[in-house]
Amino acid sequence: MAGLPQSLAGRVAVVTGGASGAGAAICEEFARRGATVVIADWNEVGAQALATALRGEGCMAQAMAVDVTRSVDVGQLAEQVRREHGGAGILVNNAGVRAIKSFLEHSDEDWERMLSINLTGQFYCARALAPAMVERKWGRIINIASIASFVGRPDRVAYCAAKAVILGLTCGMAADLRHTGVTVNAIAPGSIATPLNHDAAHGLQRRWLDAGGRARTSPRRRPIWPRTTLPM
């Protein structure tokens, strides 16, 4: 993670969408580096299960339910983190979803959902959690973008649009916070073997995998799932 020390002892990290997939992996890494991890997810059961597992390893983890599309919910999350932990030092804006269909088939609801979760939720979370970082003159905001921020992907026009705008959001926030000790960066992953991607790969999205089961947009063209899980 950009700008983060090897040891995160004494830091409080909020990870949205942290109950599963890449978000869960981020939570695990932060917790094992010594951070107190707040697993913020609408899936409270999954978040609680991960928090319990991490505490069983001797890590510090807590689950908090949040709908990132609701400004009120995000404000309550920030207040709870401030009240119980003095505020977050690290925010990973990871929560995200996709609609897998042609842009000609995208409904108004599809478009609005993609933008509200993937984009607006990042703005709400950063706006709510950054003040505590500014007060302490140290903070790290990490927005999860995507390779789709740069490269068009089939059947996910709203997702591509939201992820592209995250880059502008990141640049704007970084400029506004440049003198505060708070940095803002974006990470744009390629295809990762998460449950979300695994499900998509078994459906119509097989068209963006070649016959060898490799992601065409991955520079190293490495398999993103074991061949045993995606029989040709």
Image: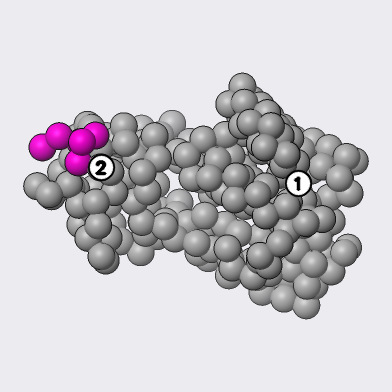
Q: Amino acid at mark 2?
A: Pro
Splitting the image into 4 quarters, where does residue 116 fall? top right
Left or right, 180 with respect to 67, comes to: right
Q: Secondary structure at mark 2?
A: loop
Marks 2 and 1, how far apart in space?
Answer: 33 Å
Left or right, 146 with respect to 170, comes to: left
Q: Which residue is at 20% across, 36% downward?
A: 228
Please name whichever residue, 101 or 133, is drawn nearer the observer in this view of the structure: 133
How packed is label 1: few (under 14 Cα within 10 Å), some, or many (20 or more)?
many
Viewport quadrant of the C terminus: top left
Which residue is the site of mark 1? 36
Stretch in magenta: 227-232
Quick check: can you spot residue 47?
A: no
Q: Which residue is at 69% across, 32% downward?
A: 56
Q: Which mark is residue 226?
A: 2
Q: Secondary structure at mark 1?
A: strand
Splitting the image into 4 quarters, where does residue 152 fall? bottom left
The percent coordinates of residue 119 (x first, y second) are 54, 49
Residue positioned most to the top = 45
Q: Which mark is residue 195?
A: none
Q: Amino acid at mark 1?
A: Thr
Please name whichever residue, 84 or 162, is drawn nearer the observer in this view of the structure: 84
Please name whichever residue, 193 or 86, is drawn nearer the observer in this view of the structure: 193
Magenta segment: does it hold 231?
yes
